[in-house]
Image: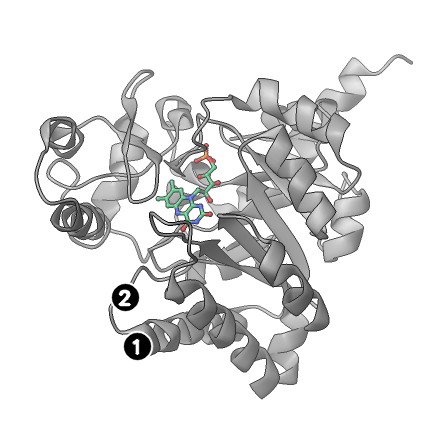
Amino acid sequence: MGPITNRYTDLVDIEHPIVQEGLGPFRTSKLAAAVSEAGGLGTVSMPGFPQDLAAGARTFREHIEECASMTGRHFAVNIPIGVDANGDVLPFTDAYLDAVLDARRADEGLARQLNVLTTSAGFPGRYVRRVRDEGLIHQHKVGSTRQAVKAQEAGVDVVIAAGYEMGGHAPAKAVHTFVLTPSVTEAVDVPVLLTGGARDGRTLAAALCLGAEGVAMGTRFVASAENSDWHPAYRQAILDAAEGDDVAFDGVYGPCRGLRNAASAKLSEAHGDPVELTRWKIESMRRAQTEGDVDGGLVLAGQVAGAITDLVSVRELVPGMAEEAAQVLRKLSPR
Ligand SMILES: Cc1cc2nc3c(=O)[nH]c(=O)nc-3n(C[C@H](O)[C@H](O)[C@H](O)COP(=O)(O)O)c2cc1C
């Protein structure tokens, strides 16, 4: 049993309330397995917005099976609920959900391990029943208190409160973690995780003080030794980033936070066919992550990148964070 246990660790059956959140469209099977092995909860990310849905679903399933082969512990998957301009759900969401359910049905051991599904972006209502009937714990990421209440009413088991300083696609409203999290924890009864800006035991302790039951991190885990599927230049760009080097630009769906570079500057001046532009954004993210083109490609990262200076080992980070948070809380509590 870890030094911080609560409703969340009990529900998900993990040692430490520390989650590596979805980092699509990139491969995170090794990273997810490492986080779960360290006592947290790793997440297999969705592999992108493919034109060939069947091929995308196959890749997703391969990543899930790869993660399951590297850990005996629980892990999660993330599926954003993408919507088009008319508010209709994009077909990749259902294709990816089918891939998850097929993988679980084909392998009882994998089904026991893969016990959490995290949805993000659009409203999760139409998926809640299906996720629950499959015996999965349903987490949903929100960017406002109103969305948190709606997600709870729809029946999700856990709400992830995402502050505007987060890496990747950020909420439409620029509400930051410190303001959003206590509002969400007051408004809902289900366990809440804080995401956006967490990086160490102190920030985990702060999240607990705000009423959350854990943290879900992205950027901190990107800059880790176990994230070996990513180009080293991407991880180095996070280590090199200084305070203020992040910027929110127009992403694939809504605002998206990354590092300020030639690609983000080009984007701020870009005009022309929106479909072409979206293709360029996705392609340039891929170039940064797989080829290390961290100036000409979009480097998704949170504001916390400016405060991250060391490449950590997940094996040490996760238990170390829980221990540090427990120490901070002990120091603060009256004798
Ligand atoms: C490179 C990168 C890719 C991301 N991709 C996704 C994604 O596919 N789905 C999602 O829900 N969130 C995505 N996010 C957001 C993270 O899951 C997480 O909520 C966020 O990184 C938290 O903020 P932090 O970076 O300050 O820890 C991404 C973030 C980053 C940095």
Query: Can residue 153 be seen by looking at this rendering?
Result: yes
The structure residue drawn at horizontal position 30% and vertical position 60%, both measured from the top left corner, is: 49
- 10 Å crowding of disc 2: few (<14), some (14-19), many (20+): few
134 above or below 259? below
Q: Is residue 17 visible?
A: no
Q: Residue 118 placed where, x, y %?
A: 57, 54
The image shows a total of numbered marks equal to 2
Residue at x-position 70% and y-position 23%: 210
Q: Secondary structure at mark 1?
A: helix
Instruction: Judge left or right: residue 177 versus residue 284.
Output: right
Asked which secondary structure carries label 2, the reply is loop
Q: Are marks 1 and 2 in contact (CB under 8 Å)?
A: yes
Q: Residue at x 37, y 49 (%)?
A: 86
State the separation of the CA atoms marked 1 and 2.
8 Å
235, 172: nearer the viewer: 172
User: At label 2, which amino acid type do we have?
Assistant: Pro
| Residue 54, x across and y down, in percent | 34, 78
Residue bearing the label numbered 2: 50
Where is residue 280? Give x, y as percent.
Answer: 14, 48
Q: Which residue is mark 1?
A: 55
* Amino acid at pointer 1: Ala
Residue 248 in the image, given as x and y percentages of width and height: 31, 27
Mark 1 vs mark 2: which is more N-terminal?
2
Seen from this angle, which residue lies furthest right?
Answer: 335
Dividing the image into four equal quarters, which quarter contains ligand 1?
top left
Residue 136 position by quadrant: bottom right
